[in-house]
Image (cartoon, grey):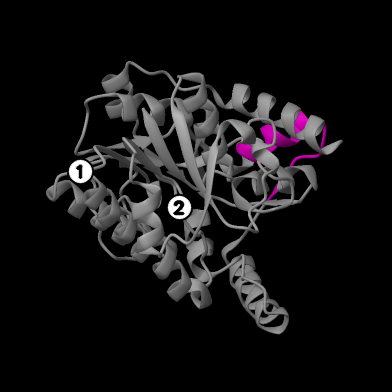
Amino acid sequence: MKVFITGATGLLGSFICRQLLAEGHEIRAVKRNTSKMTLLEDIADKIEWVIGDMNDTVFLEEALSDIDGVIHAAAIISFDKRWEDKMYHTNVLGTADIVNASLKCGVQKFLHISSVAAIGRKAGEKYLDENNRWEEGEFDSIYARSKYYQELEVWRGAQEGLQVKIVNPSIVLGPGLWGAGGSTSVFNYAYDEKKFHPEGTVNYVDVRDVSEIVVKLLDSDIHDERFILNADTIDYKSFFGKIAKAFGKKAPSKQVKPWMLKVAVALEFVRSRITGKEAMITKDTAILSRAQFHFKNEKIKEALNFEFKSLDESIEWTVKELKANNNL
């Protein structure tokens, strides 16, 4: 199969590319002139690269002219309201454009990487699955909204003839770019021996599991379905404790109190406005850090007879790779 992939240079995209190549697929991937190729340096020459803009419909139609399947993994992640318009433009309108181009070019299979952020969440609920429908509320965020509206564009494509598969991963663990944000930032946090941990729980999944599932689903006849990809759930104290131990570092021991979060949100707001940089701690992230949800994984386990890697295995492997790649 000849596969077109967006977001190939990111952590998850790079592992999906490796999995596709291992399964014998041809890859055409889109990137910008400024894209960092660090995570793909050893296999970049095995991928056909096209440079363009995801909102350029002419470019997309040319890029998809002879493609059998699409994996759409590109998205902006932000909780800073100043990024809302840009995120909507990229995540939602960009998805609408690639869906339209796929339909026009006769693409058969379309796999969309969404997020558990797009799963409906309500206060008082703990266990969530694919049947939890979106509704705006206290656990809403600008990022979650963009992922939900993004999914609506994909489902529209299904109504018009695309064989759609959607996956909703939780936080993806793996050796991404050190110090560059994203999910790898949780490893940075533990490595830097931060003292505080949130009071909530974290849902997690190994990047190798996600990439394997994505390629299996793309190859399969399954369509018009969504699947939560989540290995398990753990409290933040234990989560950071395991990562810190793997690095040989001191684990966070103090729980962040609600009043501390309010102060942190206010200070981060001021810092971001003075520096012009993105706010990393917002009202939305503060609320989510206290949440205690568990995303169920039975549907994907039954569909593919799949078993997820353990947290200890994911952390041990990720820390080993990060140490080797960054001389830590």
Whether residue 252 is visible, yes or no, is no
Please name the residue that numbered disc 2 is placed on: 291
Whether residue 264 is visible, yes or no, is yes
* Residue at the image position 73 percent from the left and 43 percent from the top: 190
Quarter in which the N terminus is drawn = top left
Of 170 and 226, nearer the camera is: 226
Residue 293 percent coordinates (x, y): 40, 45
Q: Is residue 250 magenta?
A: yes
User: Which region is colored magenta?
Assistant: 239-254
Location of residue 278 by image quarter? bottom right
- Which amino acid lies under the numbered mark 1 shown in the image of this protein? Leu
Please name the residue that numbered disc 1 is placed on: 162
Residue 24 percent coordinates (x, y): 46, 20
Asked which secondary structure carries label 2, the reply is: loop
Asked which secondary structure carries label 1, the reply is: loop
* Image side of residue 132 versus residue 238, left or right: left
